[in-house]
């Protein structure tokens, strides 16, 4: 998994399946509810490689992104800011 990050309320893990494991659906952001064990799709993001050091604040999680379908190990680096709506 790419970019495994704990939500600000520490109840949910967010992650993106790796492009190597899931090339057709790379960039799908999922949420895993720790208490219930339920997984839900959150949003489609750009295909590529994501990395994180569990960087978050009260409203957002932050991931670094690079690569594309054409070349997963190159392309420019982007900062992805995912705003988490309250109550989600």
Image: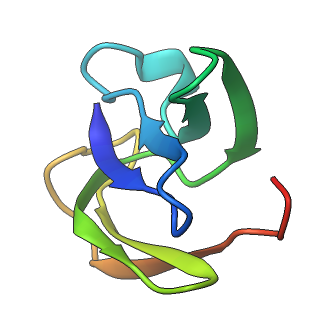
- Display coloring: rainbow
Q: How many marks?
A: 0
Residue 57: x and y in percent read 47, 86
Q: Residue at x 41, y 20 (%)?
A: 23
Residue 73: x and y in percent read 14, 50
Residue 2: x and y in percent read 29, 41
Q: Residue at x 44, y 37 (%)?
A: 16
**Residue positioned most to the front:** 35
Q: Is 38 left, or right, of 17 in this rendering?
A: right
Instruction: Assign the N terminus to one quadrant of the image.
Output: top left
Q: Residue at x 53, y 18 (%)?
A: 24
In the displayed structure, 56 sits above or below 13; it is: below
Q: Nearer the viewer, residue 88 or 15?
A: 88
Residue 48: x and y in percent read 37, 47
Q: Quadrant of residue 55?
A: bottom left
Q: Nearer the viewer, residue 65 or 70?
A: 65
């Amino acid at each position: 998994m790419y970019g495994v990050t704990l939500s600000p309320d520490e109840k949910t893990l967010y992650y993106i399946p790796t492009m190597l494991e899931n090339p057709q659906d790379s960039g799908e952001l999922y949420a895993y509810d720790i208490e219930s064990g339920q997984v839900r799709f959150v949003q489609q993001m750009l295909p590529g490689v994501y990395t994180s050091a569990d960087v978050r604040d009260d409203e957002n999680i932050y991931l670094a992104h690079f690569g594309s379908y054409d070349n997963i190990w190159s392309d420019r680096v982007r900062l992805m800011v995912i705003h988490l709506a309250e109550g989600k």
